[in-house]
Amino acid sequence: MLGVFLLGFGSCAVMVFGFGTELEVPFTGLGVVSWESGEISAPSDYLSEEDIVVSDDRVILRIKGVTLSSYADSGSMVPVLDEGANGIRVVPLSEDDIEVGDIVSFRMLGVLVVHRVVEKGVDEDGIYFIVKGDANLVGDGRIRFRDIEYKTVGIIY
C-alpha cells in the first residue's frame, strides 16, 4: 500500500516538475470523503464586505500581498479545487492567521501541496496543523507554521 502511495506521489511530482511549472498540487491520498459527511469545515473569513467592491464592469478585492495560483489535476481537493480554478492566496504572518477549515499550501518532498487544515493543536514543539485533501480519507500528518507558504483566501472558477 505504501509503495502505491509513493509511486503515485512520485509520478505527480515528476509530472509537475517535468513541465517546469509551479502548480499547486491537491495531493490525492487514499479514498474519497464526501461533503455530505459533514467532515469538512469551511475556511475562516478573510475579507470583510468593505474589502469587496462590485461595479458593473469589475470586482475589486482589497487584499495586500496577494498572488494568483493555479492547480494541478490531482483530484484530492475536488470539488473545491481542480485544474482550471484560480486561487487567490496570501502569505500568512503567524499561526493566528491559520484556522481549521482554511486551505493552505505547504511543501511535501519538494512539491507545493494544497490541502485543508482539519485540526489545529499544541504539542511539546508548539502549534501544529493537520492537513488533508477534501477527497482523501487519510491526512498528511502534522505540519508546522514554518512549513506553510500560502493561505488561500479566494477561488475563482
Image (cartoon, grey):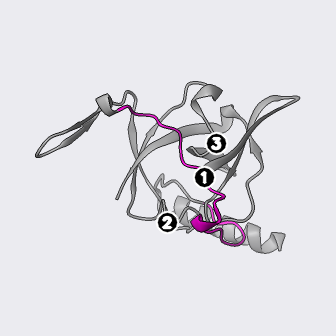
Classify 10 Å Cα crowding around label 1: few (below 14), some (14-19), many (20 and above): many
Say which residue label 3 marks. Answer: 100
**Residue 37: percent from left, percent from top:** 65, 65
Residue at 55 percent of width and 68 percent of height:
75
| Three-letter code, disc 3 | Val
Residue at 62 percent of width and 37 percent of height:
99
Label of residue 115 in the image: 1
Residue at 40 percent of width and 33 percent of height:
47
**Residue 122: percent from left, percent from top:** 80, 31
Up the image or down, 54 lies above or below 93; here it is below
Report the residue that reaches farthest toward the right: 124
- Is 39 magenta? The answer is yes
Q: Quadrant of the N terminus?
A: bottom right
Tag nearer the camera, 2 or 1: 2
Report the residue that reaches farthest toward the left: 56
Q: Quadrant of residue 145?
A: top right
**Residue 92: percent from left, percent from top:** 54, 30
Say which residue label 2 marks. Answer: 79
| Three-letter code, disc 2 | Pro
| Residue span colored magenta | 27-48
First of labels 1, 3 by sequence position: 3
Work out whether residue 8 or residue 154 is closer to the camera in this orientation and state it: 154
First of labels 2, 1 by sequence position: 2
Residue 78 is left or right of residue 58, and the answer is right
